[in-house]
Image (spheres, coloured by chain):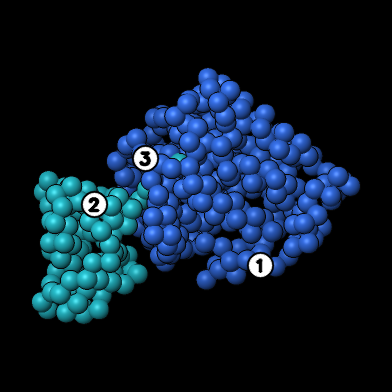
Chain colours: A cyan, B blue
Amino acid sequence: MTIRIRFFARFRELLGTDIVVAVPKNKGLSDLIKEVASRNKEGYDAIFNETGAFHEFVILMQNGKRIETADAQKIRVADGDEIAVFPPVAGG
Amino acid sequence: MNTVKSPGVNCRADTLVSDPGYQVNVMLSKRERERYKRQMMLFGDEGQERLKKANIFIAGAGGLGSPVSIYLAVAGVGTLTVVDKDVVELTNLNRQILHNDRDIGKKKVASAEEKLRAINPDITVKVIDTTIDESNASRLVGRADGIVDAMDNYPTRYLLNDIALQKNIPLFHGAIRGFYGQATTIIPGKTACLRCIFPSAPPKEVFPVVGVTPGFIGMIQVNEVLKYLLGTGELLANRLLIWDGMTAHAEEIAVVRNPACISCGAGPASKKTTAVNAKKIPKGKKK
């Protein structure tokens, strides 16, 4: 299966964007993002906390639909999925 | 007045709620007709009078608040209320275009008042030198027709979100970092609120920023305010616009109300630890 991951804002600076990955069937959404984010420790740490859970502020979307990060572990990705991962920006 | 064509949202501002104690002569003077001639080609006397009647609350006179207040002023929005508690610093001047070198050390609101009055003496500019917090937010916003979020922190944003919900007025959200920005328009009862979209605040930081980013996002916000007041166009309702200046891509993400939202849904209000239950909002300032 081919999945497209798009990081935004700070995550994009650290991890790039429009990352297309080939994954086996039944891949978990959370595991997939962890694997891709592991390419850069700072990027990984920006998204996940020390226990490996998503930081509370991380916004996760699967094909434009919001996913609760707490549910990401049990959600499976499907071929052609587009996953968006972004932090709210705070400055003004 | 036309309704706003937004997906699933029928919003218009034909009942402005501006402070009845403040009498606005909505008849346009000869001078105003001349000043606004080119935009009245777009929305006529009625539209310009609607702008003149309106009172917009601008929370912050910094990176976003500068372009927002300048463009609302030149458009002829009748009353602008600008709130900030900071002093102009040299490090502000790469983006906070209301202020210049000779304003360093001045209160931002004093600088803002001077510039906005010079830019358009035909509008009323009110400035308030204070930190927006739970104790004063509702009073400060008063009977404004809308709130522009030009803050730099989520605790105050959540507070403004709650005030907008309470008063049933729109919140025009914008935020920036570096070359990135985001904006959305929140219409109470009709769209996702700020907490539906961002239930948790990102960590506080001294954020990098280049002036064009708040300039860009501020223009999105002003464009939204004008459409809302004029009752025309399509609002950024239930749509989060995300701007990446590095690639010059603007994208949007559909957002939906969260039934369990602690601000606008059925969620426990006791969790609003950074908003209305906070006794003091730290640094309700705009950088």
Label 1 sits on residue: B3
- At a point 47% along the width and 26% down the height, the residue shown is B90
**Left or right placement of residue A92 versus residue B141 in this view:** left
Query: Is the C-beta separation of discs 2 and 1 under 8 Å?
Result: no
- At a point 53% along the width and 22% down the height, the residue shown is B104
Q: Above or below — where is B169 with respect to B94?
A: below
- At a point 77% along the width and 57% down the height, the residue shown is B38
Residue B30: x and y in percent read 89, 47
Q: Chain of mark 1?
A: B
Amino acid beneath label 3: Pro
Instruction: Specify whether residue B240 is in view.
Output: no
Query: Is the C-beta separation of discs 3 and 2 under 8 Å?
Result: no
Amino acid beneath label 2: Leu
- Do circles 2 and 1 both sit on a common chain? no
- Do circles 3 and 2 both sit on a common chain? no
Front-lying residue, B86 or B70: B70
**Dot 1 crowding, Cα within 10 Å, few <14, some 14–19, many 20+:** some
Q: Secondary structure at mark 3?
A: loop
Which mark is drawn over residue B208? 3
**Left or right placement of residue B94 versus residue A82 in this view:** right
Label 2 sits on residue: A14
Residue A48: x and y in percent read 18, 51
**Left or right placement of residue B105 versus residue B80 in this view:** left
| Dot placed on the residue nearer the N-terminal end, 3 or 1 | 1
Identify the image quadrant of residue A26.
bottom left
